[in-house]
Amino acid sequence: MSPDHAPDQSRVGFDELLRSRRLAVGLTQAELAAVAGVGVRTVRDLERARTARPQRTTVDLLVAALGLTGEDRAEFHAAARGRPAEPRPTIPRQLTPALATAAFPAGPRSEAAGDIETLVGPGRSRGVPLPGELIGRDCDVADLAGLLTAGPGAGAGLVSLVGLAGVGKTSLALAVAAEVTDRYPGGTGGIVVTEGSTVSDVLTATATVFGVGRVNDLAARLADGPALLLVDAVERAPVAMADALHWLTRTAPSLQVVATGRHPVGLPGERVWPVTPLEVPPADTEADLATVAGYPAARLFLARLRQVRREPVHPGEVGALVGLVRRLGGLPLAIELAAARGRALDLNEIFNRYGDRLLDLAVPPPSREAVAVTLRDAVAASYALLTPAERRGVRRLSAFRNRWSVELAEGMLAEDPVQPDVGQLDIGQLDIGQLDIGQPDIGQSDQDGRVDAVPFLDRLMSLGLLGARGAGPYRFRLIDVVRDLATERAAAHGELSAIRRRHAVLFARLAERAAVDLAGPKLVTVVSRLDEVASDLWAALAHSANDDPHTALRLAAALPRWWRFRGRDVAGRRWLRRLLDDPRSADADPAIRAWAQIGVAQLALEHDAGPQELPAVRSALVTFIELGETSGELAARTVLSSACLAAGRFDEARAHSEAVLALAGRIGRIREMTLAQHALARHEIRSGDLRAARRRLAAVDRLAARSGEDRLRLLARANLAEVARLEGRYARAADLGRRVLAALTAVGDPSHRRQVLGIVGLALAQDGRLAEAADALTELRGQVMPVEGVDRPGHPADQAGPGDDPRCALIEATLAARRGERELATEWYAVAARSLGNGPEPRDAVEAMVELVVHAETTASRASARDRLVAACHSAGITLLPREREAVGQG
């Protein structure tokens, strides 16, 4: 057939329609049969017209496998029943006003749907409408314009704008055409592809928009200068488009083509340009409209919202605006569909109603007979372009809640079933067969069974289903609506539970590897890495706690140091306690249960609940001794030392620290020796031997320097500041403490920062620097969690509460004493003695009691205060310092 003539497409048989639909989504007959759940022979017979009328069930299965919706679905069913299909246009010869309007969805105004005009005078540009307002694509327009006009031999003959349905490919193509049209003396033309188009259709339409009667005349027509052709929706006829564009670029080298589609054309030399969603504001963006509107996704939402409502966005709606555009993933079509609801709903109502079901957002039907097209339909069309193995891969990747790395993707796509290596749990029996993990279509496996996920990720990026931002390892993210659809499909395939278990095992392994470096010089770096996958860690913990408690316990047991460092000690302790108390985890690996018990105690110590977990950590110590695990024994004794100190078991606490020092010294574990020396220095301070404490702290500094533990060196210097304060060198204590504070601020660690801030505030108050001490007190109170219902109007009985740092009352008392407010100082010292008496630092309580003796107004009250002081020193094993003995008259 001559390329100048097109076949009659008004009547298409079911055999031809099935074949064209299958090729459009890139499936072989065998692959379509596998997806639909029918026999290969059935598909083959249908395409050869050997079956007159297929069964209704078979047609429904094929419709689902091909992802057909709306009019396409109706046409498919009509053809299967032998009814003539409605005539459908082949390829519009040009984007005339009527046809161009049909290319964009009705309802929300498309970015490309402006007034349809020609770009320049007649004969120069045919069938290309002017672009509408294009938001957030300035860099893309500039870069593409530069690529197209780079000069002879430097530009790209074929540039394909590829992306998810609704991402704005056509709008971008029109904007680029408007930008570069003056550089194409041969003119600019545009065509839209429809299903069933042939090579002849494409070539004839191209000849028409450039004003020639025959395709063979194109070369002569374009000889005077380069021309630009826009081709929209190439995925509707991929085979025909590939052949036609190959012929055009070979026959007319001066013709440059910009194609838009959901996948590349696939020609040699083709430049693929993924069109990604618009940038969204970060989750922690300030709820300020001017700030939020600086992000393209929010700016587009606001622009479309103004088309349906007059009222400006209220400050109370800004938070919902951020949540909406983030949840919409920056996808322009989704943004326009959601903004269209602003006619009837405010932004908070839109977010509450559609935030968890974005895929149900729909384009209003153009007529009563038409079917509304949902966002789910648009995403499903791109999803249908994937092979069955690629779809399975996307369903597995949908388990990730935030950004992820190539290595994590390989873990989800690996060939081997993920084994948890604990208890009786066997992931190999958890319906993993449905996952078909490690299909060759996804990536190549090396000899170790590791899947190379890079080709698969590259494929998803080329289709616009996957985004990548930044330069760190965790930079990949499925487009939100793609992830939502893939999660739906995983549930429909019965895979969701197995995928989530694989995800939990994967992150349990990640957390266990990270836990090794959380106790070492890499702490800050590893904490930041865990922060990047925090949402996945929490999701893995939540899912596995219900379905797979063994894996949940593994995961939680590896996270206590991260939780403590990030101030999540209460939440972390609750998770560990819940999992340890779960009867289903009773038969978990004893070592993992022991590490979880240590973690419970570590986190309890952060909110003065360490004594409650003494039985748990003692049980862990017994387990590790029985298992012969030296590392576990050292960790258990270290935590036991702190827990016993908090419980007032001072001799037992010291014994555990000395045992750690001896055991660590025998096996050369420098870090544990450092921790033991640090704990023993606290005991020296308690006993009043400040010289011995200095020697211990000097040893801590040397050992920490050898192991590269800068954070432990900081803690040693913080205790040196406390020793200086107890010696009466207040200015030195404040100066050293402030330097430690600055360093701790840089690395995080809120718990130890509060402790050092208390040392600094008290030293400043004792040095008479009242204004500075008051500022430190305010900051100290601002760093603790407020307690609901506690007001602090100014009196000690009202101000001191469970939300205060224990040293706040002592600083308040010292400030009052320095101001000469003796009665108020006495009240504050009494509060301090009560609040500190049950804490982990009994010396602070004793210090408050010494001041009560000093400030007593009568002989009887002085004697009573002295008796309480003697009893406290005896029970805590504390020896008063020389200046304290002198102050209370003990010589």
Image: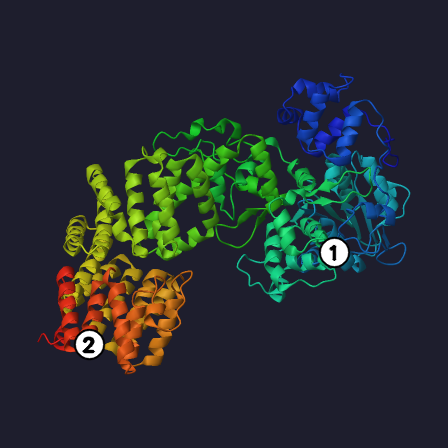
97 horizontally vs 134: left or right: right
The quadrant of the image that shows the C terminus is bottom left
Crowding near the residue tagged with mark 1, few <14, some 14–19, many ≥20 C-alpha atoms within 10 Å: many
State the residue at coordinates (20%, 79%).
Answer: 857
Q: Residue 493 location, x and y as percent?
A: 57, 30
Residue 396 has which mark?
none
Q: How would you rate the neighbour count of disc 2 (Cα within 10 Å): few for under 14, some for 14-19, many for 20 or more? A: some
Q: Amino acid at mark 1?
A: Val
- Specify the farthest residue to the left: 891
Please tell me in which quadrant of the rendered image residue 788 appears.
Answer: bottom left
Q: Secondary structure at mark 2?
A: loop
The circle on residue 176 is 1
For the point 43% across and 28% down, the residue is 428
Q: Is residue 394 above or below residue 276?
A: above
For the N terminus, which image quadrant? top right
**CA distance separating discs 2 and 1:** 85 Å
Q: Position of residue 75 (x, y in %)?
A: 79, 30
The residue depicted at 82 percent of the width and 22 percent of the height is 82
Q: Are marks 2 and 1 in contact (CB under 8 Å)?
A: no
Q: Which residue is label 2 attached to? A: 856
The tag earlier along the polypeptide, 2 or 1, is: 1
Looking at the picture, tell me which residue is in the foreground, 324 or 439: 324
- Up the image or down, 776 lies above or below 480; here it is below
- Residue type pointed to by label 2: Ala
The residue lying furthest to the bottom in this view is 820
Give percent across and percent down for residue 4: 88, 37
